[in-house]
Amino acid sequence: MNKYMELAIAEAQKGIRNGHGGPFGSVIVKNGVVIGKGHNQVVKNQDPTCHGEIMAIHDACHTLGSFDLSDCEIYTTAEPCPMCLGAIMWSNIKKVYYGCNIFDTEVIGFRDNVFYEMNKTGQKDKLLKELDREQCLKLFDEYQNIKDKVNY
C-alpha cells in the first residue's frame, strides 16, 4: 500500500471514529514531505464545505504560508467531488491520487454523481440565473484597475 494513501486512510478513520463526517481523508505532499492533512468535518462543523480535501488544502496552505500549492500532490480516499476538484485546481496541486470512485461513493449514500449530471439533465439552468451583470461588471473593472494584484 502507498504510504501516503495509508495516511489519508488514517485521517478518514480519525474522522469517522470521532463522528466528524464521512470516510474521506486526504494528505498533501510536497517533495516527499506531508505538508497538509485533513478529513471530512461536515458533521462536526455543521458546514457542507468541510470535505477532507478542503481541510487538507487549508492545512497545507497554512503550513506553507501560501495559497499556491504548485508542485504538490494530494492523496485522498475518494475521487474528489466537483467542489474539491475546483479547490484542488485553484490551489495548483499537480496530481490527484484517489482510492474509491464516484460510483463507490454513491453506493454508501453520497450524491457526487448528481453534480456531474447537472449539465446533462438541464438542472444547472434551473439553479443558476444571471442578475445585475452590468453592476457586477463595474466591480470587475474596479478590480482590473488595481496595480500589482495577484489573480487566482
Image (spheres, helix red, strand yellow):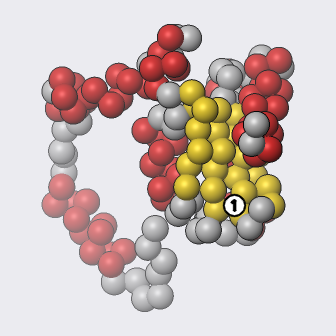
Q: Is residue 13 visible?
A: yes
**Quadrant of residue 103 in the image?**
top left
In percent of width and height, residue 118 lies at: 26, 28
Q: Is residue 1 above or below residue 20?
A: below
**Quadrant of residue 64 in the image?**
bottom right
Q: Is residue 39 visible?
A: no
Q: Residue at x 21, y 33 (%)?
A: 119
State which quarter of the image contains the N terminus. top right
In the foreground, 39 or 139: 39
Q: Residue at x 74, y 67 (%)?
A: 31
Task: Count the numbered circles shown.
Answer: 1
- Reading the image, the residue beneath label 1 is 61
- Amino acid carrying mark 1 in the image: Cys
In percent of width and height, residue 69 lies at: 62, 64
Kindly state the secondary structure of the residue where label 1 is placed.
Answer: helix
Q: Is residue 54 left or right of residue 13?
A: left
Q: Is residue 107 left or right of residue 32?
A: left
Q: Residue at x 62, y 68 (%)?
A: 71
Q: Is residue 110 left or right of residue 5?
A: left
In percent of width and height, residue 92 lies at: 53, 63
In the foreground, 85 or 128: 85
Q: Is residue 83 above or below residue 65?
A: above
**Which residue is at the far front?**
1
Q: Is residue 41 above or below residue 111?
A: below
Q: Residues within 10 Å of mark 1 (few under 14, many from 20)?
A: some
Q: Residue at x 33, y 31 (%)?
A: 116
In the foreground, 137 or 58: 58
Q: Is residue 86 left or right of residue 76?
A: left
In percent of width and height, residue 120 lies at: 19, 28
In the foreground, 58 or 1: 1
